[in-house]
Amino acid sequence: MTTKLKITAIKPYPVWVGTRNQMLVKVETDQGIFGWGESGLSGREKAVSGAVEHYREFLIGRDPMKIGRIWQEVYRSQYFEGGRVLQAAISAIDIALHDIKGKALGVPVYELLGGKQRDRIPTFASTGDEAEGDIAIERARELRAQGWQAIRFFPAGQNSRDIFEPRESIGATASMLNKAREALGGDVVLGIDY
């Protein structure tokens, strides 16, 4: 690549993925190279979209290859750090810029981040955020039968208000994981999420 790239567009795309809203961001350049990023903050996609649009105003025309400089400028452009919404917007843009740089240089993004660290990445399956009690245990059995080695539970259910009461929540979590361990055996990794 001999000519300098310029950012020509930054577009937020709120999407529904499974049971959560997410925010994807596409950064486009004058040479047709584009990158995709994800905010990672579900349920606040409209707020993140507004923050992405705010940053877009002073990133158009900038060199997307200067990832560190852009990150510093958008982060430091805030009087306060901005909390999760602004950080999610910065993250999505940053990931998209890495995608662009990798494409422009003809290397995978992991090479930009220090090289390949492992040959395999462990993954997990989830019982689903609506599954509680015996339903969650049954779903976990089905996932185990499909070959999953790690399974995540939502002990109180994603929409339960009980998760905000620590004693009750910890007790319910311990009880559910004990039942899961008995049902699934000792060789499966159990995880939790709230």
Image: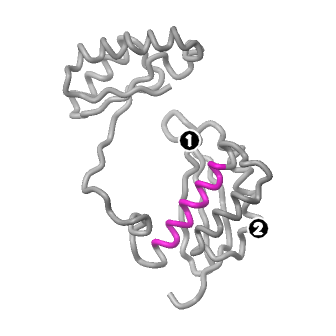
Secondary structure at numbered mark 2: helix
Q: In x, y percent, where is residue 132?
A: 43, 15
| Nearest the eye: 43 or 78 | 78
Residue 24 in the figure: left or right of residue 102: right
Residue at coordinates 56% horizontally, 66% vertically from top-left?
97
Mark 2, other Cα within 10 Å: few <14 / some 14–19 / many ≥20: few
| Quarter of the view holding residue 189 | top left
The residue under label 2 is which amino acid type? Phe
Residue at coordinates 48% horizontally, 78% vertically from top-left?
104
Mark linked to residue 2: none
Residue 186 in the figure: left or right of residue 47: left
Q: Earlier in the sequence, mark 1 or mark 2?
A: 1
| Quarter of the view holding residue 32 | bottom right
The residue under label 1 is which amino acid type? Trp
Q: Is residue 112 above or below residue 146?
A: below
Membership of 147 in magenta stretch: no
| Nearest the eye: 185 or 126 | 185
Which is in the foreground here, disc 1 or disc 2? 2
User: Pointer 1: what residue?
Assistant: 16
Membership of 92 in magenta stretch: yes
Residue 50 in the figure: left or right of residue 139: right
Mark linked to residue 58: 2
Q: Is residue 152 above or below residue 109?
A: above
Q: Which residues are magenta?
A: 87-102
Mark 1, other Cα within 10 Å: few <14 / some 14–19 / many ≥20: few
Residue at coordinates 41% horizontally, 26% vertically from top-left?
192
Q: Is residue 162 above or below residue 146?
A: above
Q: In x, y percent, where is residue 172?
A: 44, 10
